[in-house]
Image: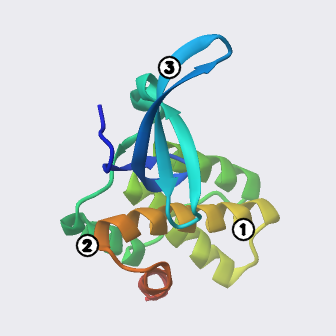
C-alpha cells in the first residue's frame, strides 16, 4: 500500500507522485484508486490500488541506484535481432517489466542502432517513450530537470 506523496513507477507510463487516493465507482464496481501525477508530461493516471502488484507498480529507485543506470547506459549493447519487428517485440517485453535497467537497455540499444541505420517508425516511437519513462524516474530520483537528464543519457550512450 502506498501513501499520498509517494513516488512510484507505473510501467509503460513512467514515474510520478501519488497526489490522491480516491474511491470511485466504475462499471458498477466501487474501488480505490491512486491518482498518479507524472510531472514530466503533466498527466494524471488512475491506478486501481488492488491491481498495483499485478501491473508491476514499484517505488522509484533511490538516488544511490542512479550510478547503476548510468553503467547500463554506458555498457555494451545487447545482441539484438536483425529484423526490426523481432527487435520491437523483444524491447517491448523489457519495457513491460518496468525495471529501470531494462528501460535503460532499450534506450541505449535503440539509440545506438539509430546512429548506424535509421529505426523503423515503431522503433522511433518506442525509443521516444522509453526515454520519457527513463527520464521521469531519474527526475524523481535525482531532483534534476528533464533537459539535464536528456544530455546525461545521450552522453552516456554515445561513449
Mark 1 element type = helix
Foreground mark, 3 or 1? 3
Q: Which colouring convention does the figure follow?
A: rainbow
Q: Residue furthest top?
A: 28
Can residue 78 be seen in the rendering of this structure? no
Q: Which residue is mark 1?
A: 124
Who is closer to the viewer here, 3 or 155?
Answer: 3
Q: Specify the label residue 31 is tagged with.
A: 3
Relative height, residue 28 to residue 38 (above, below): above
Q: Residue at x 53, y 43 (%)?
A: 96
Rounded to the nearest whole Å, what is the CA distance between mark 1 and mark 2? 26 Å
Q: Quadrant location of the C terminus?
A: bottom left
Q: Residue at x 72, y 68 (%)?
A: 124
Category of crowding for the residue at label 3, using alpha-carbon neighbours closer than 10 angstroms: few (below 14), some (14–19), many (at least 20)? some
Who is closer to the viewer here, 26 or 136?
Answer: 26
Category of crowding for the residue at label 1, using alpha-carbon neighbours closer than 10 angstroms: few (below 14), some (14–19), many (at least 20)? some
Q: Which residue is mark 2?
A: 67
Q: Specify the label residue 151 is tagged with.
A: none
Rounded to the nearest whole Å, what is the CA distance between mark 2 and mark 3? 38 Å
Amino acid at each position: 500500500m502506498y501513501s499520498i506523496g509517494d513516488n512510484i513507477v507505473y510501467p509503460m507510463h513512467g514515474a510520478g507522485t501519488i497526489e490522491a487516493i480516491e474511491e470511485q465507482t466504475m462499471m458498477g464496481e466501487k474501488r480505490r484508486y491512486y491518482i498518479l501525477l507524472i510531472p514530466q508530461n503533466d498527466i494524471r493516471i488512475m491506478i486501481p490500488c488492488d491491481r498495483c502488484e499485478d501491473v508491476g507498480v514499484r517505488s522509484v529507485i533511490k538516488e544511490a541506484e542512479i550510478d547503476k543506470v548510468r553503467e547500463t547506459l554506458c555498457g555494451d549493447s545487447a545482441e539484438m535481432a536483425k529484423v526490426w519487428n523481432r527487435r520491437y517485440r523483444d524491447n517491448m517485453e523489457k519495457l513491460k517489466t518496468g525495471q529501470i535497467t531494462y528501460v535503460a537497455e532499450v534506450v541505449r540499444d535503440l539509440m545506438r542502432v539509430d546512429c548506424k541505420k535509421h529505426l523503423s517508425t515503431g522503433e522511433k516511437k518506442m525509443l521516444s517513450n522509453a526515454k520519457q519513462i527513463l527520464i521521469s524516474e531519474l527526475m524523481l530520483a535525482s531532483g534534476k530537470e528533464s533537459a539535464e537528464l536528456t544530455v546525461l543519457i545521450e552522453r552516456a550512450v554515445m561513449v
